[in-house]
Amino acid sequence: MGGRIVTTKIILGPPGTGKTEYLLRKVEKKLEEGVKPNRIGYFAYTVKAANEARTRAINKFTNLDKKDFIYFRTLHSLAFKQLGLSKDDVLKDNHYRELSELLGIKLSNTNRKMDNNGFQMQDDIFAKVIDMARVRNITLKQQYQEMPHMQGGWMKIKYISDGITEYKRTRKLYDFTDMIIEFSKSTREDIIPRLDVLIIDEAQDLLPIQWEMVKKIMDKAGEVYIAGDDDQSIFKWAGANPSDLINLQGERYILDESHRVPLEVHKIATNLINKVENRIPKVWSPKKSNIAVSRGSVKHHVNRGSVYQQIQKDKGEWLVLTRDNYTLEQIADEMKTKGFYFSMHGQPSVSKKRLTAIMAWTNVAKNKKAITYDEVKTMYHYMTVRRGVEYGHKGLSNADPEAHFTYEELCVYHGLLVPAHRIWHHALDRMPAHEVTYIVSLLRRQEKLNQEPRINLSTIHGAKGGEADNVALLSDLPRKADEAYYKDPDNERRVFYVGITRAKKNLHLVRSDTDREFAEMFHE
């Protein structure tokens, strides 16, 4: 690492042991001791986590505000700030479209989506290989050779990579990975912030190039706190490696009491994670309480139908987890067929737009209430545009966007043609038939569609950091994960360990309907 010696404190937090809470208390203690907020660096995996840490400090120290905490950020945000970049310096969608044309290669998706950490999620396989090599800090050839299923050949990959590099160089543009690399390689004295206290949260998820950046900051920091859990390192596919945290030198402190995981869930979780060979051993206890709920429960289900019955019976909160998105979509389709109201990827199974249209029609036609311009537009979206006298509308012309509209006003002045006695799924005739059937079934069951669903669907990776009273964990493995298991079983063990430990009360393990499942969860 070079430079002066820095004593690094490594905070290892098993699931539910309050790792982030520990770090936030550390921030408060340092502020109480007189450390200036602009001398504290709190770098979190997501923008949300960094903002929450800053908000908590501001709420307690009311004499401080947002501008005082300039180093409560993600690492990519820090690089952007310290390098003095602006939005005009960053690659945008139009640049990728132009690049695709210049290369003469139509990439499958040039619209690159930014994840919470600032790195770009690549849908295009060629761009994925190129980015993976860069974030792992290895050569493009090495990355290519590690992907036996890669289609297209080495020369094509090299051609695209060289084209991207030259395009950015001539136009002096950066992508988010460039920012991290440029920060780490810079010799400018003003680039690296001088901090009295450096805090890194969720360190097990750091990519190799981010570790290089962190080490640069550590060289100029006073106290250093690195928090994470190698057992919860599940983003190997994105370039993260648990060994980076395992091999980190410093004073280790293990948070040893979970405030989430009950006894029975703790047993199966520890049994699974103890099979991992390359890890930091940890002794931690389950949630303490004398009441029965603290023991929790682990139930095994032979198929999905069994767990659906359980979800129907138990009206509490549920988190349904799968290993991959394909299985998750299957679960979503099955739940719609069975009439469950749920959320997936943070979105309710009945879109807000459809619900707004239904409520708008109900209010304006049945309840004789005036509705807003936006509500009218949304309602009209699901109505056929016609010139007849029975259905649909003729368009919303000469309407005041700030006004409210009654049914009569819409009919006389704004093209509404649907009689008021029509029920919503007849009035909204452009709403897909299968969605109408689904929504009607929910309404008959008196589901509160204006509230957050009690059932959430997610992949295990998407639910990291989440929790629920009841967790249903499906053991289905996609083919690639099944193949990867035999090469690196520890990775799948970590993934399912994270899934298991989302349960606050009851864990439901569901056997696969296929010939591929993670069987280690079902036996000692």
Image (cartoon, rainbow, N blue to C red):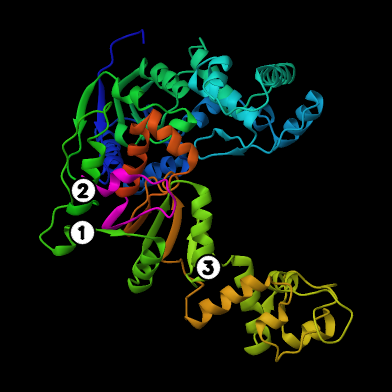
Q: Are marks 3 and 2 in contact (CB under 8 Å)?
A: no
Q: Is residue 256 left or right of residue 170?
A: left
Q: Is residue 35 above or below residue 285?
A: above
Residue type at mark 2 is His
Q: CA distance from mark 3 to mark 2?
A: 32 Å
Is 508 included in the stretch rendered in magenta?
yes
Tag 2 residue:
266
Residue 336: mark in rendering: 3
What quarter of the picture does the N terminus occupy?
top left
Identify which residue is drawn at 28% across, 26% down. 278
Q: Is residue 333 left or right of residue 265?
A: right
Is 1 included in the stretch rendered in magenta?
no
Q: Residues within 10 Å of mark 1 (few under 14, many from 20)?
A: many
Q: CA distance from mark 1 to mark 2?
A: 9 Å
What quarter of the picture does the C terminus occupy?
top left
Q: Residues within 10 Å of mark 3 (few under 14, many from 20)?
A: some
Residue 185 on image: x %, y %:
51, 13
Residue 296: mark in rendering: 1
Question: Would residue 501 be visible to someone looking at this image?
Answer: no
